[in-house]
Amino acid sequence: MIDDILKELKASSEKAKEALKRDLSKLRTGRAHPAMLDTLRVDYYGQSTPIAQMASVGVPEPRMLTVKPWDKTGVQAIEKAIRESDLGLNPQVDGDLIRIPIPALSEQRRKDLVKIAKKAGEECKVAVRKGRHEALDMLNELKEGGDASEDEVDRAKKKVEEAVSEAGQSIDGIIAAKEKEILAI
């Protein structure tokens, strides 16, 4: 039973780290990547449609994205959605291809992105600490129910603390790597 609690804690911290990595991948770092457009939705025939479902997004060079709609009638709608987004991008239509140059980030914008990354890291740590709290509660219930001895529960609590500490260090590493990526010119 104690092993199940520890496995559940480790699984929840892995999920939290995966969610953090997904969130950080959407942050703009001055380099083009297709995930930048994942959150954009286009009004396409009265439906709010993700760009990935109506076009292919490519990265021909580090500071350029290309969007090639499968239906040529969607070019104007995609261009409008990109232009009106809060990404600060200026798409250029070239026939049925949309080219999106990625401008260099200003120093202030880089600092803001680092703050956003650190905030996401802190939210991830909160999720891990919530998992720790739940694991400790379950261990206390085991002890009170007589399903485990006090020594077993104490050893398990130490393992819980070690797992949370390890997850925290891993999260710090992920944030440090993203911060370095953002601040690189």
Image (cartoon, rainbow, N blue to C red):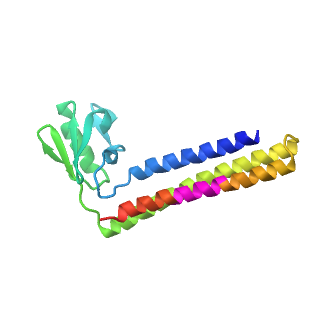
- Residue drawn 55% across and 48% down? 16
Compare residues 22 and 162 and report the one nearer the observer.
162
In magenta stretch: residue 168: yes
- Location of residue 2 by image quarter: top right
Front in this rendered view, residue 52 or 184: 184
Is 139 left, or right, of 185 in this rendering? Answer: right
Quarter of the image with the C terminus is bottom left
Residue at 71% x, 47% y is 135
Q: Residue furthest right?
A: 146
Q: Residue furthest left?
A: 95
Task: Describe residue 97's horizontal placement relative to residue 82 as left or right.
Answer: left
- Residue 24 image point, x, y percent: 43, 53
Q: Which residues are magenta?
A: 163-172
* Left or right, residue 134 beside residue 116: right
- In the rendered view, tell whether residue 11 sits above or below residue 116: above
Q: Quadrant of the N terminus?
A: top right
Q: Is residue 99 magenta?
A: no
Residue 91 placement (x, y as % from top left): 20, 49
Task: Please tell me whether the stretch drawn in magenta is mainly helix, strand or loop.
Answer: helix
Residue 167 picture location, percent across and down:
59, 54
Judging depth in this view, the residue of 137 and 73 nearest the camera is: 137
Q: Where does the image place residue 32, in percent across and percent down from the top left?
A: 28, 51
- Image point (29%, 58%), residue name: 30
On the rendered structure, is 14 left or right of 69? right
